[in-house]
Image (tube, rainbow, N blue to C red):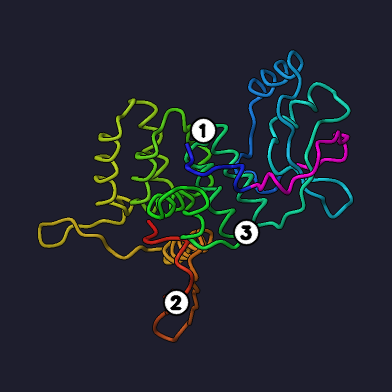
């Protein structure tokens, strides 16, 4: 549960009276960290609304196109759409993007358990769409800065890897351990083995540790002095693409980072610069 009073964030004393707004004049919340709603949960809520009505009005704000934008209550809005209702009880409030983002996300945290990817996405929205610094996000959501940084690191997991992860089956601890692997293929191998062998968090961490010590493909390893050592990757394009992908993922979590390249006669140079004076959100130590 988030340790923040939603009423205090919204400012009840400034709200207008409840009115009914046509559903076709309402737009979804762009700051909602939840991107998917299951049909089952919406149908259950729709049935409850059908039986008992809307117990609490949604909160909306005026939108640029003359319509309204949901701030709190998107599930209720979607359920009413399923029921084919024409209008929904709502309170209209004028508010800026920052306040709308904070209220919408805190409301989500209060009313339902966001999974770890949704929570990470929520902090990313507050940082990049509402422009909040790490300490502001911590204060407004009731989370610690360490927790926020840890969650944001999850967004470094490539989309194709994230698509394989069921948050109901794979624990956040297991996903965090994947960040030790620089190869998406290695990360997917771990996920497949978690599913197939029902690995515990400790077992999956041991597997990651083993793979992280051998992060290059087997054909790129050789014998030298009686020991296995990693050799240079034959196809340097793969190596450079890995670096560029890492920089891209770091930018997505808010790190002020740049990459420049120079193609010399005898060498190829890549320079990565990180701005130490940038606002500290966004990430402490990307994995």
Does the image show residue 273? no
Give the farthest residue toward the front: 13
Q: Quadrant of residue 129?
A: bottom right
Circles 1 and 3, Cβ within 8 Å, touching? The answer is: no
Image mark for residue 130: 3
Give the magenta range: 10-28
Tell whether position 256 is magenta. no
Residue that mark 2 sits on: 277
Who is closer to the viewer here, 257 or 189?
A: 257
Vertical comparison of 255 with 95: above or below:
below
- Mark 3 Cα-neighbour bin, 10 Å: few <14, some 14–19, many ≥20: some
Q: Residue furthest left?
A: 226
Q: Is residue 144 above or below residue 171?
A: below
Q: Is residue 24 found inside the magenta-colored segment of the image?
A: yes
Neighbor class of circle 2 (other Cα within 10 Å; few <14, some 14-19, many 20+) is few
Q: Secondary structure at mark 3?
A: loop
65 sits left or right of 41 in the view = right
């Amino acid at each position: 549960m988030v340790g923040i009073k939603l009423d205090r964030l919204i400012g009840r004393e400034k709200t207008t009276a409840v009115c009914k707004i046509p559903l076709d004049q309402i737009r979804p919340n762009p700051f909602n960290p939840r991107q998917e709603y299951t049909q089952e949960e919406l149908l259950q809520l729709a049935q409850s609304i059908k039986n008992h009505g809307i117990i609490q009005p949604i909160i909306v704000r005026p939108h640029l196109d003359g319509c309204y934008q949901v701030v709190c209550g998107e599930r209720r809005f979607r359920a009413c759409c399923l029921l084919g209702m024409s209008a929904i009880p709502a309170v209209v409030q004028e508010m800026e993007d920052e306040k709308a983002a904070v209220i919408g996300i805190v409301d989500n945290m209060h009313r339902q358990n966001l999974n770890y990817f949704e929570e990470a996405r929520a902090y990313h929205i507050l940082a990049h769409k509402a422009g909040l610094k790490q300490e502001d996000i911590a204060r407004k959501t009731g989370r610690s800065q360490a927790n926020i940084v840890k969650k944001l690191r999850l967004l470094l997991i490539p989309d194709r890897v994230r698509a394989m992860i069921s948050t109901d089956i794979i624990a956040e601890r297991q996903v965090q351990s994947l960040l030790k692997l620089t190869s998406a293929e290695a990360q997917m191998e771990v996920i497949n083995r978690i599913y197939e062998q029902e690995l515990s968090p400790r077992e999956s961490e041991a597997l990651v540790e083993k793979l992280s010590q051998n992060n290059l493909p087997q054909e790129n390893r050789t014998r030298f002095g009686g020991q296995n050592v990693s050799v240079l990757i034959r196809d340097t394009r793969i190596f450079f693409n890995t670096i560029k992908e890492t920089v891209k993922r770091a930018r997505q979590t808010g790190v002020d980072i740049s990459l420049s390249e120079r193609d010399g006669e005898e060498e190829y140079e890549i320079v990565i610069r990180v701005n130490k004076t940038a606002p500290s959100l966004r990430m402490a130590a990307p994995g």
